[in-house]
Amino acid sequence: MPEDTEHGWQRRGVLQGIGALGAAAAFAGVGAATPGRDPGAKENEVLVGVSATADGVATTVEQYVPGDAELVHENETLRYVAVRFPATASDAARENFVEAVTKKEHVKYAEANATHEALATPNDPQFGDQYAPQQVDAPGAWDTTFGDSSVTIAVVDTGAQYDHPDLAGNYASNPGYDFVDSDSDPYPDAPQDEYHATHVSGCAAAVVDNDTGVAGQGNSTLINGRALDENGSGSTSDIADAIEWAADQGADVINLSLGGGGYTDTMKNAVSYATNNGALVIAAAGNDGSSSVSYPAAYSECVAVSAVDDNEELASFSQYGDSVELAAPGVDVLSTTTETRGGYERLSGTSMACPVVSGVAGLALAQWDLSNSDLRNHLKNTAEDIGLPDSQQGSGQVDAGAAVGTEPGSGGGDDGGDDGGSGDSTTSSVDGSLEGYWDYDDYSYGWNYDSPSQVVVELDGPSDADFDLYVNTGTTEDATPSDYDYGSYSTDSQESITIDSPDDSTAMQIDVDSYSGSGSYTLTVTEYQ
């Protein structure tokens, strides 16, 4: 991308007016994998992202694929392909391809097809009863609603036993898709070993009030995108495809009880796509006990969830840090498991805390009509302060009773962390246009609230161009593609940046930049008090 000094002109102004972004994205679908593509981890593959201004995704890349490699997968919506190298190829061969292909026209990025793991740690049973629903006051919510089948939670995970007696009533009649084996049945291949998603599903939405087994948080509809194999491992491409699929199915909440692999543009683009299409993506913080949150939870689009025990103390395994937004029970959580394993068991992990939050989100949506951004803030505004540092609990432990019983924007709830707030919001937008890859617009946004709890910056640009979004806070320096605090640079022109507790000591600096192509756009800033 050219430096800003090469741009033809610059525009700078204060955003004015009230508006709302209608994010538009084409549902082009996922290309089928070639026969023989291995399930699970795909360590010999490189993912290549292609700009929206290219004529075709696969045709752009295939001319640069070395003779010993092959193009094995294409996702037209997220605009990437997977290139597989033989197992005998050296790391240097893949690294040389990455370095060479990223210099080609229309190629936005190239990266390893990283491996992600289910985030559960089995533990010996210690408790005779469930405690998670009681600890987050699900019974207080049930006085008003048990949930609503019109709300959909997508579990992107291993395969789930969707016909489990305590899950069947909440699983959709078409329960999901298997991205590991490329078929329409996400049922576990090896139920004795592949039980993670069955447990996660029960944490969120085991059928409540059915005289059977355990209760989840509420009766939302469940769907399952099987992206992890029977070993609990899955590739970036399978998970990204499953996230896109879940968004296209109209999922209100997407649960990601998985992690590892670090930052990847492909996964970032997938969670951005889901967010832009109205889903709230909720992700497990990670299980290595470190002071930083793992990906995908660390993406700004995702709600990162830490785990606490039945004494409301941070679990010893739970990762924590500034990215944590909510906490939930995640130690010895009793939930459904595959019937091969006995039907019910206790597991520990941020994998268990994450779907507790997803289930509460479903309960809130059964009571209130909320956008994904408003839902995110409502869950934080109504969270319970359990006395942990903000880095461990975020805004607090999710509270189902308060989320259902408190009218959004009323300022109710404990507001445990610094990124809580009153629930009030204000939206400003501006329209503009860019003429080509040399062009960009700069804006300076003056804050409406003192110490806002969150700001969401969204770009809605032309479908046949590739515009990017960059933001600086706490400085008067313009944001640029080479100097920015926050960036969103997917392969199209639908971009979104979420910043919790933004630095409001100076006006926010925003750069709308054309990577390639031209056309009109709408830039929207939503600020939460």
Image (spheres, grey):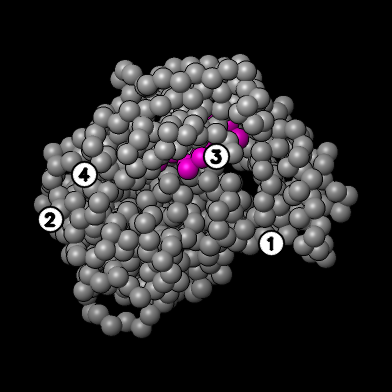
Mark 4, residue position: 421
Question: Quick one: which residue is furthest to the right in this view?
Answer: 67
Q: Is residue 495 magenta?
A: yes
Tell us which disc is closer to us: 4 or 1. 4
Return the residue at label 2: 140
Residue placed under numbered mark 1 in the picture = 43
What residue is rendered at 83% in x and 38% in y?
A: 63
Which badge, 1 or 2, comes first in the chain's sequence?
Answer: 1
Disc 2 and disc 3: Cα gap in Å? 48 Å
In space, the residues marked 4 and 2 are separated at their CA atoms by: 22 Å
| Residue 323 relative to residue 193: left or right | left
Magenta span of residues? 484-498
Q: Which residue is mark 3?
A: 483
Q: Nearer the viewer, mark 2 or mark 3?
A: 3
Q: Of marks 4 and 1, which one's residue comes earlier in the chain?
A: 1
| Residue 141 x/y as whole percent | 15, 52
Q: Is residue 383 left or right of residue 172?
A: left
Label 4 vs label 1: CA separation?
43 Å
Question: In the picture, which quadrant includes the C terminus?
Answer: top left
Per the image, label 3 sits on a secondary structure element best described as loop
The amino acid beneath tag 1 is Glu
The mark closer to the camera, 3 or 1, is: 3
Cα distance in 3D space between marks 1 and 2: 47 Å
Residue sitting at x 53%, y 46%: 268
181, above or below 286, in the image: above
The disc, 4 or 2, on the residue closer to the chain's N-terminal end is 2
Question: Which corner quadrant of the image does residue 290 belong to?
Answer: bottom left
| Residue 246 to residue 321: above or below | above
Q: Amino acid at mark 3?
A: Asp
Q: Is residue 343 visible?
A: no
